Image (cartoon, rainbow, N blue to C red):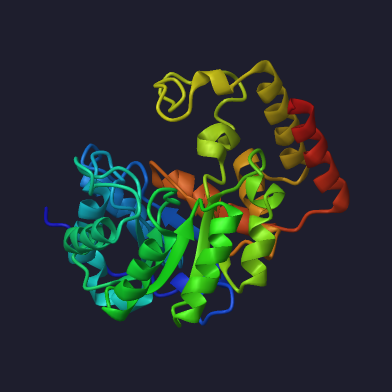
Amino acid sequence: MINPVYSPAPGRYESGIRFRRCGRSGILLPEIALGLWHNFGDVNPLASSLEMAHYAFDHGIVHFDLANNYGPSYGSAEETFGLIMKKSFAPFRDELFISSKAGHDMWPGPYGEWGSRKYLMASLDQSLKRMNLDYVDLFYSHRYDPETPLEETLQALVDIVRAGKALYVGISKYPPQAAAFAYKYLRERDVPCLVYQGRYNLINREPEVEGILDQAKENGVGFTAFSPLAQGLLTGRYLDGIPSDSRMAKEQFLKSSALTPEMLKTLLALNEIAARRSQTLAEMALAWCLKDDRVTSVIVGASRVSQLEDDFKALENTAFSQEELNAIDQAISDKR
């Protein structure tokens, strides 16, 4: 049987999705974006990737977040997305906001990672071919490079925009001093930084502690949170131990050593707070990130549609009482 031609849901923007302005820009981003870090590579069935991408777009999730080395294997998530573009999304390109990145290890040799002009430009050219795109909406410097002059990295971003290969640029995981330099450099060249992407969740609050959130807001820069569920710790999967089919059981990125007795106690306490809010732990974790108007959106991963369905429910209640926030902070502090 031939699969029917994809037709998106007519009511995709009335599904409950909400949009937030990204810094001081004209761009509105959905509060939830779909990240393709895992589960969209060449080791995953294309049918599953199509199903998740279709569900996302059918519910107004128009932001798809990639990077050159997402997979596994490297580059394969972009190749998968290129197939999705060809099969389904090409007629709707102007409704989509597609981001990619370069900065981490991608290919052998001295020009296959970090922040040189040669690497960033070559990587983006490869990404565009893999994704069947003429341009990306947003291109990130994926990490700060302490060895390459920051001016070289940032001028490459400026020139990428001027060449029409990206509409906007962003930075990810930059320390505050480097971020401040980047904001000023890019603004002075009329290519302002659109967004900062950083790890942010109930457990890992470095963007708060280091002043990244305030700094971004002061500079008119949005903030997108990756790993809002702490790579799965905050999904609720580990409240009763380590499931045999879980990421932790396979020691993939999330190590079993992370589930200490203190961490389990914290997760159980957080789960109780979530239950009192009539939410799952995952729903509350996403809602907690979105309670802050300095956060533009959260980037979620998924291995099946049911996970996206659950994530979407977080948008139903992103307001917290002071009592709830205090209880959450107490649960977190007990872990330390």
In this orientation, which residue lies closer to the viewer: 241 or 189? 189
In this orientation, which residue lies closer to the viewer: 296 or 14? 296
Residue 284 shows in the view: yes
Residue 29, percent from left and from top: 51, 70
Residue at 24% in and 59% down: 118
Residue at 78% in and 40% down: 328
- Left of 142 or right of it: where is 297? right
Report the number of numbered marks: 0
Q: On the image, which quarter does residue 140 sit in?
A: bottom left
- Against 241, residue 39 (above or below) is below
Q: Residue furthest left?
A: 1
Q: On the image, which quarter does residue 42 sit in?
A: top left
- Left of 78 or right of it: where is 233? right
Residue 223 shows in the view: no
Residue 302, percent from left and from top: 42, 45
In this orientation, which residue lies closer to the viewer: 329 or 209? 209
The quadrant of the rendering that contains the C terminus is top right
Residue at 64% in and 51% down: 207
Residue 24, percent from left and from top: 58, 78
Residue at 18% in and 63% down: 87
Q: On the image, which quarter does residue 58 sit in?
A: bottom left
- Against 219, residue 243 (above or below) is above
Residue 115, percent from left and from top: 35, 54
Q: Residue furthest right?
A: 323
